[in-house]
Amino acid sequence: QVQLVESGGGSVQPGESLRLSCVAPKFSDSLYYMSWFRQAPGKEREGVAAVSPGGSLTYYDASVKGRFAISRDNAKNTLYLQMNSLKPDDTAMYFCAAGTVSEFWRAPDKLWRAPTRYTYWGQGTQVTVSS
């Protein structure tokens, strides 16, 4: 069974940075779109950012654009999320997800936000931003 494993979460103050990692050790994730989602208590899971299989295309939610950067290293089967200028509103459990290309190719700039299109999920890593 494929397992995605996130790491890098923690508690920081507003304005600080964190880098999340997600390792998928048992499959070649170069065939998958990969994304970061987050879920705060009492709220629905929302898409944060996504990256195409080759890494050339990225998509961001408006709330994080310019502050967060998604990237992937397919040789290491690892997905990253660099989070800068963190705000209290960024506090949430962060999840990585992987979905096959066939789920997204028609309109990746829209479809990446749909959690139901992803096959594999990690267990999450908590990010807390507070002064």
Image: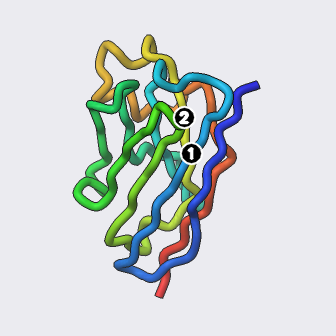
- Residue 43, located in which quarter of the rendered image? bottom right
- Label 1 packing within 10 angstroms: few (<14), some (14-19), many (20+): many
- Label 2 packing within 10 angstroms: few (<14), some (14-19), many (20+): some
Tag of residue 49: none
Q: Is residue 114 left or right of residue 95?
A: left
- Residue 119, located in which quarter of the rendered image? top right
Which residue occupies 43% across, 74% down?
88
Residue farthest right in this picture: 1
Q: Amino acid at mark 1?
A: Cys
Residue 90 image position (x, y, % from top left)? 44, 65
Q: Amino acid at mark 2?
A: Asn
Instruction: Tell me which colouring the rendered structure shows.
Output: rainbow
SS at badge 2: loop
In depth, the one of 78 and 81 nearer the eye is: 78
Which residue occupies 51% across, 56% down?
20
Which residue occupies 52% across, 40% down?
78
SS at badge 1: strand
Tag of residue 22: 1
Residue farthest front in this picture: 75
Residue 29 image position (x, y, % from top left)? 52, 26
Residue 1 image position (x, y, % from top left)? 76, 25
Q: Give the residue at mark 2.
A: 77
Give the vertical position of 83 relative to 105 (above or below): below
Q: Of marks 2 and 1, which one's residue comes earlier in the chain?
A: 1
In this rendering, the count of numbered labels is: 2
Q: Is residue 26 left or right of residue 70?
A: right
Q: Do residues under tags 2 and 1 come within 8 Å of each other at their CB atoms?
A: no
Give the vertical position of 6 relative to 87 (above or below): above
